[in-house]
Amino acid sequence: MLAVDHLAPLTHEGTPLDALTREGLVFGCDYNPEQWDRAVWDEDMRLMREAGVGLVAVNIFGWSWINPDRGVWDFAELDEVIDLAHSHGIRVNLGTATASPAPWVTTRHPEILPVAEDGTRRFPGGRQGYCPSSPVFRAYAAELSRRVVERYADHPALAMWHVSNELGCHNALCYCDASAVAFREWLRARYGSIAELNTAWGTSFWSQRYSAWDQILPPLAALSLRNPGQLLDFQRFSSDQQLELYRAEARIVRAHSTAPVTTNFMVTAHIRALDYFSWAGEMDVIANDHYLDRRLPDPIAELSFAADLTRGLAAGTPWLLMETSTGAVNWQPHNLAKGEGELLRNVVSHVARGADGICFFQWRASAQGAEKFHSALLPHAGTDTAQWRSVLEVGRTLRALQPLAGTRVASDAAVLFDWESWWSLENEGRPSDDVRYLDQVHAAHAALAAAGVSTDVVSARADLSAYRLVVVPALHLVRDADADRIARFVEAGGTAIITFASGIVDEQDRVRLGGYPGAFRDLLGIVSEEFAPLGPGQSVTLDDGTTGTVWSERLRTVDAEVAARFIDGPAAGLPARTRRTVGAGTAWYLATLPDASAYRDLLSDAAEAAGIRRNPVAPGVEVVRRAGSDRSFIFIVNHTTDTVEIAAHGRDAITGVAIDGTAVVAGGAVRIIEEAS
Ligand code: GLA
């Protein structure tokens, strides 16, 4: 249980998370007391202390609570909630309350409501019902955040600022008139002249040449395929507009407060509108929201990937899981409960991959509202429940893991990730609908995991010099400078594994002529003459006995070895995998998606050849290391139902029991071992 009397104001020295992890990794939640009668709040506090909750995100959806009508401000309840948290030794992650406009705002200004791709306006009644470019919305949001910040900047319970909430979750792409005006301004700043824009978008095609700025619209639904340059720039613009909302509020916060500022990212499989690599530098703490996506074939592999990408956004430093669920969500078609031990396994997976804190949506399961069937720390059924007991276990575990705080995951391998490639690859008029960006990136990441290789997921713009092995899956859109950096990485001794669909277009989505894979043709010493994608469910066989799906192409080597050939399918007899020695390094090309075991073996061999230290592997078991200058921890998360034995030496970080050679991990259990140095 937390002590009540230790809530001295935070000094904000060191990293923002250092200040919050002195007694344990962060254990927090969204707290929405405005949904409940005052009488419930005391019980909330008592139970939060029992569970060890140390950080609450409040006022996230507080607009109509604190500003119920135009010119009416009522902070009495929020004051009381923050004071109450403070008196119970609980710190506050304070929302600016701008996430969802109050009804009076949209009644007074219906023009701020967002417009969908088909030109129809969306009504209020859900959340985030505003156009991100609306100057009217921005003015109201600025006033609201200024009032909140001025009021609470000096409150001793304040730990950090939570700008808005999941910016762009629902309203990332708005096609209204205000968006059109802002889009034109954005394009003017990017291109300077209409002539440049016409060149960039290739508007000679289909008679799309513009003669004045006001002819340019957001890419509203059209009768046929739309201009890909316009689509891509609209995606860039839309990400920038959301970032601008963050910046505007962060500026207001920083003018009054020295507390760290952040907003919660959505690094997940179903949100792709925000280029978080361009946002990350503006956050004082990288915070992500992640929920298991049961619609995917392997939700756990996706969790691992998302956590590794979040660490990439944090440039390797510890990050915060700002939201996750204890059990079911309520927004998937089938909202599955977590199985026995699954909550702890999920928590430990995030921590293993660099999270220094885990927060949940939300504290108490709502009795009303659209999320009344979403799980919470405190379930509808109360505390005499297995769910509550598993929450207490999470609290104890996060507290016991305090010595981990600040340590990092060390990786010799990286997968490159790029939102612009995701957008351009999946825009209209592409060679195959089956080439989905995330599938390709996930396959590479999963194959490295299966080979026991710890992997960073980093930007296509990242410095690669610290890595030995870099996988470049479907990096469709590549800038010259990024392709050059990858080539230099190989020349200096690195191994790059580049897959099909990489290097195809430049920054303007213009095909790099002269043969695929354009930007990587010289590095790889190959020329691909024609795409030959596979049909749905079709697979091809290679002459090494492995199989491939999704893709093949008709390529020839110019200066590379053929490591395997297609023996059937549309590229029968042609190279399926090539290898070229370049300087001190090696560049591989994969012209099809290898089956999972072939991909694992390929990356395992490449890691071996690159001299990469590997983690022990067992099917269905996650093994990850986090290390600081003077300590190292090995995390074992057993996702199977069988007991496994993993080689380890040291001391169990939770129980203190010595581990001498073999860690025994029961089915569904986790172990965290502080390794003997
Ligand atoms: C998001 C939001 C929360 C809540 C959860 C439900 O993460 O930020 O307000 O809606 O989803 O899963």
Image (cartoon, rainbow, N blue to C red):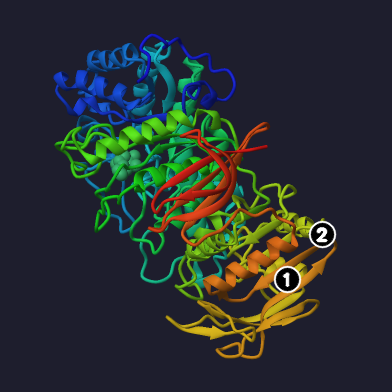
| Residue 170 drawn at (x, y percent) | 33, 47
Which quarter of the image is occupied by the C terminus?
Answer: top right
Residue 464 visible within the image: yes
| Residue 90 image point, x, y percent | 36, 19
Q: Nearer the viewer, residue 100 or 577?
A: 577
Rendering coords of residue 24 (x, y %): 46, 26
Task: Name the residue at 64% across, 64% down.
Answer: 604
User: Front-most of 656 and 513?
Assistant: 656
Q: Quadrant of ligand 1?
A: top left
Q: Earlier in the sequence, mark 2 or mark 1?
A: 2
Q: How many marks?
A: 2
Q: Quadrant of the N terminus?
A: top left
State left or right for residue 370 relative to residue 294.
left
In percent of the image, x 37 and y 21: which residue is there? 92
| Secondary structure beneath label 1 | helix
Q: Is residue 495 above or below residue 166?
A: below
Q: Quadrant of residue 537?
A: bottom left
Instruction: Identify whether 297 is placed above or below 80.
Output: below
Q: Amino acid at mark 2?
A: Glu
Amino acid type of the residue that numbered disc 1 sits on in the rendered structure: Arg
**Mark 2, residue position:** 491
Question: Residue 114's x, y, as percent?
Answer: 31, 45
Q: Which mark is residue 521?
A: 1
**Marks 2, 1: nearer the viewer:** 2
Classify residue 225 as left or right of residue 454: left
Rendering quarter of residue 631: top right
Against 67, residue 406 (above or below) is: below
